[in-house]
Each structure stands twice: as structure tokens, then as C-alpha cells.
Image (cartoon, helix red, strand yellow):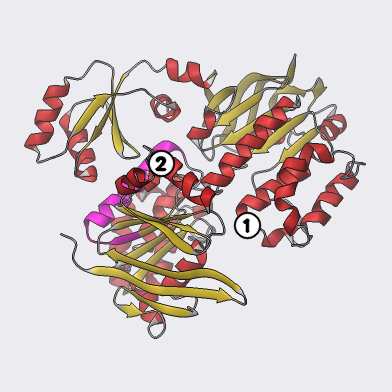
Amino acid sequence: MSDIIIRNISKSYEEVEALKKISFEVEEGELFGLIGPDGAGKTSLFRILTSLLIPDAGEAEVCGFHTVRDYKQIRKIIGYMPGRFSLYQDLSVEENLTFFATIFGTTIEENYSLIEDIYVQIEPFKKRKAGKLSGGMKQKLALCCALIHKPRVLFLDEPTTGVDAVSRDEFWAMLKRLKTQGISILVSTPYMDEASLCDRIALIQNGNILAIESPENIIGGYGKHLYEVKSDQFYQLLLDLRASGFGERIEAFGEYLHMSSVNPVDQRQVREFLEDKGHREIQLRETQANIEDVFLDLM
Amino acid sequence: MKTTTAIEIKDLTKKFGDFTAVNAINLKVSKGEIFGFLGANGAGKTTAIRMLTGLSMPSSGEANIAGFDVYKQRESIKENIGYMSQKFSLYGDLSIRQNIRFYGGIYGLSRKEIRAKTEQILEELQLEEYADKVVEELPLGWKQRLAFAVSNVHDPAIVFLDEPTGGVDPVTRRQFWEMIYESAAKGVTIFVTTHYMDEAEYCDRICIMVAGKIEALGTPQELKQRFDTDNMDEVFLKLVRTN
């Protein structure tokens, strides 16, 4: 049973095609990641699925409800955390939460067990105005507000953008726990490393879906040879390798450069070339692709 | 060899009432260095940067930025640094050309210099045919690269970048970093904050702030060795969690 069904959805804004005939499904209890850069169409899709935007063509259902015809039912059963911080900045933490509980006809107490893990972390600041919270705490409060009516499906639009690595890590641990409670989650992120934490991901760019797979299969489908290279002069290495003709694509990847190539590269030749160019402490070896390599390759 | 010092900080402290946001930090950054300034949200990074850019007066300690004192020469500091952040950079309702002219004017460039800079930036970014387009309508990645170019319009000694690459695709992020390398290779000092740990690896040295203090400082390689791990994510998590 699929909790989200998307069929041939298109949406344009004047001459910009934000979504081009997109189709996919999210299963019940699935943690599904929408991975792509700013401007890929992620937010338009979220707005359509949450009944806030009408598509130009195609249809979508959430828990069997049509996003246009049944918009009232949809709004009762979903939780939505938009990309831009959308809580009331001049209300306190506690007031925001009470407000959202009240408009959904429930109370904080009724569903407290669902938000407890998250709420205890911000409870010491419950009298503080939401606008005065740090990035990580704002994000936790927004998640609590999206969960307080016990939604069946949770929509999280870039919940971790601009949030530090520790808070991001904690946030994903919370999503894992919510998943065990049977809540389906559609989450978008520009951070490629977060993709591996999803059950399945869709890579999206310029309104097109480039691939839909489990993270393992996405990586398994990378059909090229990939090498990591390093020397004592990082930037010069990038320039030299690009000019060398070895590999088809050279990109920085943390402390290494990644060089991809359809055909195997003669590593001894590369080393000799780099030594001639004055590079020292050269490291070169074949390596495994990660999601970001695949994304770069598909773009 | 990098010999000249671009930034020197001794026991720099900022208090807000009883709260010490920045607690006696010490730092030396060389000319042409790419220095990564990392920390969790709320660790005191923004407060520190506001002091280093002459926007906020320290409570105590010393800091010298591009040869100028943070207490007595704040205006000279502002003239000799560039600044770019996600939140504040370009005027969305002005065109590319107008933004460059505006910032050139603010930094006191002559008309002739502004004309030359405009041509140079448009050419380097390959934006000639979009010069009169309103900035708001450009893709985020273009805006970021333009914002970086504009923050360099007056040839500053140091450029401060506050989370410059949030939200863009991996290709655009890399193009942005290649602009940074290029500037650093020309001798510009880069002081950058980021939440992307792979970007921390692109820095010559980094420091990690935790609760107002600098808890680690070194090359990415040194920090990974010290924390006995092979990735920066792990260094960051270990350091921030234990504190």
C-alpha cells in the first residue's frame, strides 16, 4: 500500500518548468528522500502534495486522498515542515506548540509520547521566543509542531539546511524513530551524505527525476572506474589533472580528488605525469563511488 | 612560503551580560591561507566574525585584521575586507551590473575602475548576456558566485565567507570552491564558515569552536590524526559531543 502516489505531475511558472511529468510512489512507513539542489523542483512538489499548490497536469494522492479534490482531508492527516522557518517568531516555544495542537483540535498531552524525545531537548527553553532559538532548536520545535496532531505522513522540506553536523545527526536519528511508529516520511535535502540514511531516494534536478532507487542500488549502478588522488598541492593537482587528459571528470572530494573514467586508467602513467609536474606525496588508488559521485555523473 | 600575518587574535572575548559568547580565543591566519572556522549552531562563530569584521566591539582581548586594530581602526578594517553571507549579499531587485556598480561605489572605486571591474567580473563568470537581468531571477548558484565576486570588488586583503554554499548542487558548490582557490592563490586570505565537512577538508587549516572556545586548531590531516579517524565529520561529532 502506497501512502503517496504521484502520477505525471507537471508544474510551470511562466516559462520555467519546475516539474516535468514526475511519477513515483512512497510506501507506507517508508523514509523516502528527495535529493537535489536548490531550484530542482522539490518545494513545488511538496506544495502540491500538501494541497497548497494545484499542478498544471497529473494527479497525486496522499493516503488515498486526492490532493485537489480532497484537500480538506489531506490537511488533517499530514504534517508539513516547510523549508523556511514558519513558526511564530514572537510566540514562545510552548505557545507555538499549543497553537498548533489547538488548530488541529488536539492537546499537547494527547500526543506527547510522539514528540517526547524531541521536546525534552527544547523544553528547558520553553518560555523563550521562537525567533530567539538557535538553528538546531528551531528545527526541533518545527518538527514537534508538525507532529503534534499525530500525522500519518510527514513532509519535511530541507529540514537540515544550515544546521550543524551534530544537530543533523540527531535529527536523522529522530526520523528513524518516527518511522518505527509507522509514519511515512518524505524528506528533501541538498546534503548527499544524508541520502544514505533513507530507505529509497529520488535524485531530482531541473524538474526531472534522474533515478529512484535504494541508496545501495544507486551506488551499485555507477558504471565507471573511479580513482581518488591526492598530492602535496591540492589546487594545482586539480588544474594539472584536468589538463592531462586522464579521466573524463576530475572533482574535489574532501581531502582527495575523484577522477572518473569509462575505461580503466593506467595508474603508473598518471603517477609519472604528476611527478613530472612537480607533485610530491602522490596517492592514487581506485575507490568506491558514493551518492555524490553518482549525482555528479547524472547531472 | 606564507610569511605575512593577515589575522592575529589574542584572548578575544565578547560578553553579553553574564553570557560569554566568545571566550578568550587565540588565532593567527597567514596571508593567502584558506581558513575554515567551524562550530555548532550557537557556538559563537557569528559573534566572533562580527568582531573580526569591525561590526561589534570586543569586551576584551586584541585583534588585528589586515594590519588594523579592531578597537581603533574599525572603518579601515571594513575598507580592507570583503564579506559574503547567505543572508546578506546582493540586492535582488537590482541587475547584476547595478549590484557591481553599487558595491564598487560603496567601496569608493572610481567610475573607470567600476567599469573595468564590471567587465572583468562578467567575463570571469560568463554572465555577459545576463548583465542587465535582475539578480532575484538568477539561480542560487549564480547568485553565490556573483556575491563572491562582488565581495572582492575592491581587492580586499581578506574575504569573510559565512556559509557561502548552503543549498546548492554539488557541481555548483565545487565551482564556488574553485573561485576560492583561485583567490587564495593570488594572495587573498579566505576566512570561511561551513556546515559541509567535506568543505572543511578544502581548507589549509581549520578551527572548531565549541561553547565560545576554540577547542581544536590545525590542518584537516592533523585533526583527523588527533581524533583517530579518517573523516572530518567524525572529528566534529567527537569534539562537539564530548563538550
- In front here: B124 or A159? A159
Q: Quadrant of residue A22?
A: top right
Amino acid residing under circle 2: Thr
Q: Where is residue A54 in the image (x, y as percent from the top left)?
A: 74, 32
Q: Position of residue B21 (x, y in %)?
A: 54, 68
- Rendered image: mark on residue B172: 2
Q: Quadrant of residue A244?
A: top left
In this view, B200 is above or below B231: below
In this view, A295 is above or below A189: above
SS of the residue under disc 2: helix
Within 10 Å of disc 2 (Cα), the crowding (few <14, some 14-19, many 20+) is some
SS of the residue under disc 1: loop
Residue A141 appears in the picture as rendered: no
Q: Quadrant of the N terminus of chain A?
A: top right
Q: Name the residue under label 1.
A: A134
The boundaries of the magenta stretch are B169-190
- In front here: B41 or B209? B209
Residue at left 49%, top 70%? B23
Within 10 Å of disc 1 (Cα), the crowding (few <14, some 14-19, many 20+) is some
